[in-house]
Amino acid sequence: MNAIAHKNENQRLKALKEYGISKEREKVFDDLTELVCRLTSIPRSLISIVDKEEVWFKSQRGLELNSSTRELSFCSHAINSEEDIYLIEDARKLEEFKDHPFVNAPDPLIFYAGVKLENEQGLPLGTLCVLDNKPHKLTEEERASLLMVADLAKRQLELHKKNTELLKQTAILEENNEMLKSFAHTVSHDMKMPLANMVLTTDIVAKKYGSNIDEAGKNYLNYIKDAAFGLSDYVTQILAHYESESLLVEEKETFDAYTLLEHIHEILAIPDDIDYILPEDNIELQINKSALEQILINLIGNALKYNDKKTIEVKTDIIDKEEYYIIKVSDNGIGIADDKKDEIFKMFQTLNQPDRNGKRGNGIGLSTVQKLVKKLNGMITVNSELGLGTEFVITLSK
């Protein structure tokens, strides 16, 4: 007995490959074969996948077989049927099946009813079918049940395909992201030495030839030096952004808030005339310390830079809830316009306002903050009024 190829066999097999259906059992398909048996009272059912040489069963109930050849499988005939249900009430009475090995087996296959599982283009991938070892006539209710469960199986296969496509796209994006991180890391490191040389060279020129350089020339040297420092800071921020994920592999640590905030005070070299306000209570935290430190360095650093007040005030508050921490960083700085509150977290987006020293930001720091907060299963929001100040509120799960 030869299997009849589908009229669009090549396209059908190509479509089947795109679904990436594995031979591993999955509960959702097993539930469908059980459901159709319960609804029809027919003891055996299967979801078949009709491959090039083999018909294998994604799920089966009441059968010991896991697969069959295309030549012997009734499903090979079902996928070529124009009927909504390919029906064999008694295979012994049909000339083409009366000598079939399955029909003449000790536990014979006498009854078969199969529905094609087609993709959106109408190409059959396999079948949902019910089988019995005795003749059977489908009632209208059984027909409706079989078609309904087949529709559920089709939807599940489509979901499977979408998941497969999503996994492929995710893998591609992850690969591209790794390449981008590697590129940014390499370029950033390669730029650091030339920038350091620029700063050193301007200092040497100013010291050695200062008496021969007029005021305009000295201003140009300072401009070059400031530009080099600005670019160096930009490079450092890019490196911090792409290396921030490495902080997330670290385990949670137990530490107190004051120790961390005083350490940040030293890192940022905050002058004594800054009103640096610590939380009222020295909360003990159990969290990824390195990631939180990077978050606070960025937020507190911005609070110091983007402030036009004579007396700068930066306040940090940490609240210990049962399942999470609330961390607030507020200032009395220049504030953020309402239409910019969402934009500030986007990479390379800035407020187009100079900081306290007349320098413009690079739009990387807050993007890094949001990235770290999300990776820590947290949330960050911002409250701000122009001219009055800004408050960042972070919620982090314990």
Image: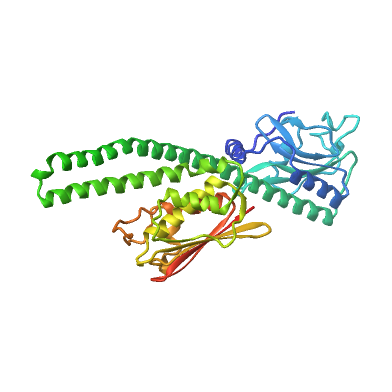
Apparent side of residue 117 relative to residue 335 in the rendered image (left or right): right
Q: How many marks?
A: 0
Q: Position of residue 106 (x, y in %)?
A: 91, 29
Q: Position of residue 274 (x, y in %)?
A: 40, 61
Would you place residue 304 above or below residue 36 in this image?
below
One can see residue 113 in this view: no
One can see residue 308 in this view: yes
Q: Position of residue 329 (x, y in %)?
A: 49, 61
Asked where in the image residue 131 lies, by quadrant, the reply is: top right
Q: Residue shown at 42%/55% (left/top)?
A: 301
Asked where in the image residue 91 lies, by quadrant, the reply is: top right
Would you place residue 91 above or below residue 395 in this image?
above
Q: Position of residue 292 (x, y in %)?
A: 53, 50
Q: Residue shown at 56%/58% (left/top)?
A: 379
Would you place residue 301 above or below residue 112 in this image?
below
Q: Residue shown at 59%/57% (left/top)?
A: 282
Asked where in the image residue 117 lies, by quadrant, the reply is: top right
Q: How is the protein colored in the picture?
A: rainbow
Q: Nearer the viewer, residue 193 or 266?
A: 266
Q: Nearer the viewer, residue 232 or 66?
A: 232
Q: Nearer the viewer, residue 58 or 216?
A: 216
